[in-house]
Image (cartoon, coloured by chain):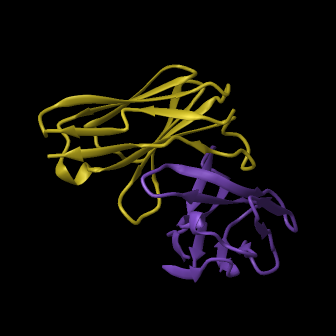
Amino acid sequence: DTEVTQTPKHLVMGMTNKKSLKCEQHMGHRAMYWYKQKAKKPPELMFVYSYEKLSINESVPSRFSPECPNSSLLNLHLHALQPEDSALYLCASSPGLQTSTDTQYFGPGTRLTVL
Amino acid sequence: GNSVTQMEGPVTLSEEAFLTINCTYTATGYPSLFWYVQYPGEGLQLLLKATKADDKGSNKGFEATYRKETTSFHLEKGSVQVSDSAVYFCALSTFSGGYNKLIFGAGTRLAVHP
């Protein structure tokens, strides 16, 4: 089983709202990732967690706040977003971070619209 | 630096035509190479991968060979179907800055008509 699940599938929020995106994997992977994908573009890395600790933050604005409650779950908390933050948010996981041969497995994404 | 270049799309083919999507890369060290596919409204799915030179990845009739001498990883399929219509991303993975980083090409949109 190589499934990564994400909820919700779609989310519409106002600029003053607080919302959260959720990601879950049960493959025993120790690395989890958040990506942002704009239309007709490849995914852009936002955050990397390794063994439940934040390893990489690609200079993401503080209105995006990641959280890894346990090895299977990854959340992305959203607050005071801007319309330009509207995008597809993808979660991914991989067995680890220490080798380039590991495959990243992606979830179906959450389509976020900020009004 | 590390980068991936894909042929620009869209690529438009008739059903049962032969498909080639070109991908070349620039990398230091020994990257792994991947093809991901993204169907409309969905996330990325791994299509195939190769982890060392001369390896051939294959899946669902698609194949690609890791060519170190030409730094290429071209995607091919002998007979495409309408259901293959999607965006295809070539990517390389390299251990850099203490973690495994995935670098994507710009993506190539494929449209297959009956």
Is B108 above or below relative to A64?
A: below
Residue at the farthest top position: A70
**Quarter location, residue A114:** top left
Query: How many circles with numbers are drawn on the protein?
Result: 0
Front residue of B14 and A53 = B14
Which residue is nearer to you in this view: B34 or A30? B34
Residue A10 appears left or right of A48: left
Which residue is at the far right? B54
Residue found at x 81% / y 73%: B68
Residue B8 visible in this rendered orientation of the protein: no
Q: Horizontal placement of A48 versus A77: left or right? A: right
Eyeballing the image, is B23 above or below A99? below
Rendered-image quadrant of the C terminus of chain B:
bottom right
- Place of residue A30 in the rendered image (x, y in percent of width and height, measured from the top left): 64, 29
Q: Nearer the viewer, residue A58 or B24?
A: B24
> Residue, x 72% and y 50% (percent of image)?
A100
**B49 w.r.t. A59: above or below:** below
Residue A11 coordinates in the image, percent (x, y):
27, 38
Residue drawn at x 83%, y 60% is B52
Q: Is residue A12 visible?
A: yes
Residue ranking furthest to the front: B114
Question: Where residue A4 sits in the image (x, y, percent)?
Answer: 56, 34
Chain letter matching colour yellow: A
Q: Is residue B56 left or right of residue A107?
A: right
Chain painted in purple in the figure = B
Quarter of the picture holding the N terminus of chain B: bottom right
Give residue A38's position: percent from left, percent from top. Answer: 36, 58
